[in-house]
Image (cartoon, helix red, strand yellow):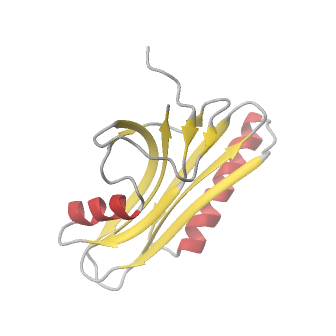
Amino acid sequence: MLPTPKKYMVTAAGAEGTSKLNAFDNALLQAGIGNINLIRVSSILPPDAEFDADLRFPLGALVPTAYGSITSDIPGELIAAAVGVAVSETFGVIMEFAGKCSGQEAHAAVSGMLDEAFATRGLKIVERKIAACEHRVNQVGCCLAAVPLWY
């Protein structure tokens, strides 16, 4: 059985690269999570998980992460990504978004998805954290927004 994560952070960044994979890697580095291995997870924040804006990970660690990303090789295109965490009195929900829009639009999309998720569950949001970024592509760009979870 895997341990349940006890900490999380919310981060977002955009970057350029010479390829889509390099742009993604550079966005990971800018977001502070470039030297770990992301294990993509769905969208539930464990009960009692605590926010830690300065969360650090061992190099190469396998880190459960909910994230959204977009890459583009269309010069001048505006791309964005956002991630949000909303917490009830019992547990939290994570929502991710990435698209061809502004950071403000990505932020609004995630906020609306969190509202819907909590309305569907009949829960009240007591805390909300959202991180969003936008990037105007020069050659090859990426936006990434993520919620890494840790022990």
Q: Position of residue 87 (x, y in %)?
A: 71, 42
Query: Between residues 69 and 116, which one lies in front from this camera angle?
Result: 69
Residue at 40% over, 58% down: 69
Q: Please, is residue 141 above or below residue 110 in the view?
A: below
Query: Between residues 137 and 22, which one lies in front from this camera angle?
Result: 22
Q: Quadrant of residue 83?
A: bottom right
Residue at 30% over, 43% down: 59
Task: Tell which residue pokes out farthest to the left in this image.
Answer: 18
Q: Please, is residue 35 above or below residue 64 in the view?
A: below
Q: Position of residue 36 (x, y in %)?
A: 32, 45
Residue at 68% over, 57% down: 112
Task: Tell which residue pokes out farthest to the bottom in this image.
Answer: 76
Query: Between residues 37 and 122, which one lies in front from this camera angle?
Result: 37
Q: Is residue 18 left or right of residue 5?
A: left
Residue at 57% over, 53% down: 53
Q: Is residue 7 left or right of residue 143?
A: right
Q: How many marks?
A: 0
Q: Position of residue 85 (x, y in %)?
A: 63, 48
Q: Quadrant of residue 88?
A: top right
Query: Between residues 76 and 39, which one lies in front from this camera angle?
Result: 39
The quarter of the picture where the N terminus appears is top left
Q: Please, is residue 95 above or below residue 7 in the view?
A: below
Q: Is residue 62 left or right of residue 73?
A: right
